[in-house]
Amino acid sequence: MRLPTFQSFFRSKIDLPLVDEEQLISEAVTLDVEAEHHRTLLSLRRRLADTFTPTRPLPGPRVELFSNDNRAAFIGREVECLRITRALLEDQSHVVIFGERGRGKTSLANLVAAQVQEASFDVARYVCSTTSNFDAVMRGLFHDMPRWLTGLSRTGYDTGLASLLPSRPLQPSDLPLIFERLSSKVILLVDEFDRVADEDTRTAVADTIKQFSDLGMPVLFMIIGVSDSPEALLGRHPSIQRCVTRVALPLLKPAHVRKIVERGAAQSGLNFSASARTCIAELARGVPYMAQLLSLRAGQAALDNGRTTILGSDLLAAIEAAAIEADPRVLALYDLATNTECDAAALSVLRAAAAGSQDELGRFQVVSNGRFAQVAGLQVDGTAWQRVLNVGAIRHVRGEGPDLFTFTEAMLMQLVLLRTVLLSQAVVHPVSVNSAPALLTRP
């Protein structure tokens, strides 16, 4: 068989369609535009994740107390921050920061720590666990101190601070002799102190605070924990009342939450409309964690669809995600209290408590006359109120009068609101793509 020559081979191809150069250029441009759009969305995702951080506290150096740049301002905690820094720097007072979960206690402590370091204080940190005792807390704080503070050695922990500690478990009486050897003013930041289960440890810390204050030592505790009161953290010690500044962390005002979302929108490059900001503020009810979570998930939903503007459908996706991501304990308590949303009367009780009138600490009044109960200003079935109370979804606030109550789990209030929106959207009126989901109307 005779093989074709190169000339005849190429001549046989002349009937093929010619290449459209303009089409090739157009397709290349389209690919470039799509690639650039993909890079833009990827960059926005990174900015969004750096802006809204529900899973981690704000580090102190990233935020400032007062700033003309809204992106850098620490919103809604100016009064508390000023009280704490003044207590530490001017009054030489120990500080206890307390409040429910999700209110930004650690973020506030980080901000304060950064400020006191600028005022020539050194800061040592320890995060408690359920097994922490007094010896573990104090040795952990010593381990976190700058190694040069002892003035003994700059070569490391083993030859510096460890040489000052006895081999036996530490006692409060050991500490004045050790701390007087330090060459700087020190803040001892003890976080999650509520997790300490040992009452003797709590008492020992209180005794140490008393000793440091009586001796006028330049060593101050800043203790942070989930609690209704500082007494629940440190016990009732009348002798330390005068040397401890108590700072309760209240719920943020709705305007502050809206400003957090507005600032985050500017920083992340996304567009949260006024209605979207209001929706997030209503659902967060003053809890920074929930505001950050909803903003993050709504932004992610918009970017998933190639948009930078948050629509109603994005908010609904964020609400669904936040409800699914709730703490398993909170989900279990919600299902128990509502019989998996089959007990309509119990649902009404929880919705009244979540959406009704509350004080700045998230507490509400309940007046029951048997048949009916006024929960947070709203009338509900009295028997249903008792059922919710009996399963432990709501608890009485000790020491604050007979009629003051709060949710047993801090995030149960938000879960009730999230589930209410989801149920109403599914049953009553499906969400509009462009509008924010409708919320409960509070009195």
Image (cartoon, rainbow, N blue to C red):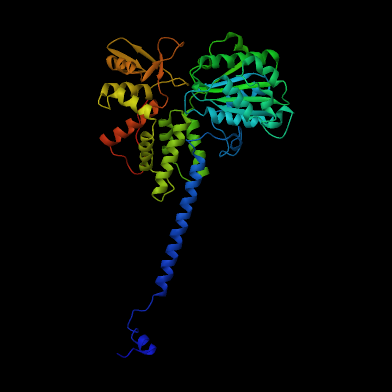
Give residue 252's position: percent from left, percent from top. 49, 27
**In the image, is residue 15 above or below residue 36?**
below
**In the image, is residue 244 above or below residue 290?**
above
Give residue 38's position: percent from left, percent from top. 45, 55
Count of marks overlaid on the render: 0
Question: Which residue is situated farthest in the front direction here?
Answer: 167
- Nearer to the camera, 162 or 221: 162
Horizontal arrangement in the rendering, residue 234 relative to residue 220 (left or right): left
- Nearer to the camera, 324 or 288: 324
- Nearer to the camera, 182 or 320: 182
* Residue at 40% across, 31% down: 283
**In the image, is residue 278 above or below residue 433?**
above
* Residue at 41% across, 49% down: 307
Give residue 104's position: percent from left, percent from top. 51, 29
Quarter location, residue 435: top left
Regarding residue 436, the answer to whether it shows in the image is no
Regarding residue 321, the answer to whether it shows in the image is yes
Quarter location, residue 414: top left
The N terminus: image quadrant: bottom left
Horizontal arrangement in the rendering, residue 325 relative to residue 230 (left or right): left
Give residue 222's position: percent from left, percent from top. 60, 23
The C terminus: image quadrant: top left
